[in-house]
Amino acid sequence: MLMEKDCSEIIVGNVCFIRDKKNNKVLLLKRSKGSMQNMFAGVGGKTNFKESPYESCSREAKEETGLDISEIKLRGVIKTILDGTKSYWILFVYTADKFKGELTDCNEGELSWVDIDKIYSYKLIGFIKKLMPYVLSNNIFFEGLIVHDINGNIISDDIIIV
């Protein structure tokens, strides 16, 4: 059970999946840092104190990809807990269906446009893999809790469609 003192350590952040609907692709980041190195996720990061989750999503996408995104849609909200640590995140999960600009190098890892039909052949972080059917589906909003290990493997989850 989480103690009240642990609540001050919750990080608010976002993950965004930029989609190229014309070519049926999604932009993934192969992480080069941290515990889930060499695994794939969307782009994103921490929300600054004085910015909204939406602003944070747009800023993080620009910083990590060089792209200006639009048609940003909130797809879900997930709390993630890294088992055995005090790593707690509230993640706002977005898609962006339009973008302008040129893809740049990312200091967080390697960016790749991936065929949506082949996305599950990539080494996705476990909780990202769990969320992808919801993220890629239209008209679904989800929320929940995912507990995972240091390698991103799901220990438990409670995802609901709302």
Image: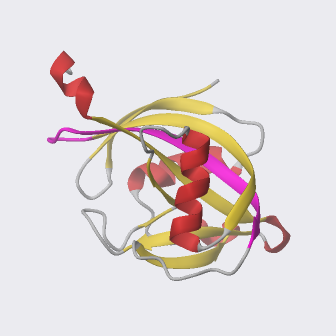
Residue 60 appears anywhere in the view: yes
The answer to whether residue 120 is visible is no
Q: Quadrant of residue 22?
A: bottom right
Q: Position of residue 29 (x, y in %)?
A: 49, 70
**Picture residue at 26% right of the left edge, 25% below the top:** 7
Determine whether 3 is above or below 140 in the image.
Answer: above
**Residue 53 on image: x %, y %:** 55, 40
In x, y percent, where is residue 159?
A: 50, 31
**Residue interval drawn in magenta:** 82-100
| The image quarter in which residue 160 lies | top right
Establish if 140 lies above or below 153: above
Quarter of the rendering occupied by the C terminus: top right
Please name the residue shown 24% across and 49% down the image. Answer: 149
- Look at the picture and state if 157 lies above or below 151: above
Q: Let me know if residue 72 is in the magenta part.
A: no
In which quadrant of the rendered image does the N terminus lie? top left
109 relative to 6 in the view: left or right: right
Query: Residue placed at 45% from the left, 45% from the top?
Result: 47
> Could you tell whether 107 is left or right of 155 in the image?
right
What residue is shown at x 57% (from left), y 51% (from top)? 57
Q: Position of residue 91 (x, y in %)?
A: 46, 41
- As rendered, which of 57 and 21 lies closer to the eye? 57
Q: Main secondary structure of the magenta part?
A: strand
Residue located farthest toward the right when viewing the structure as drawn: 22
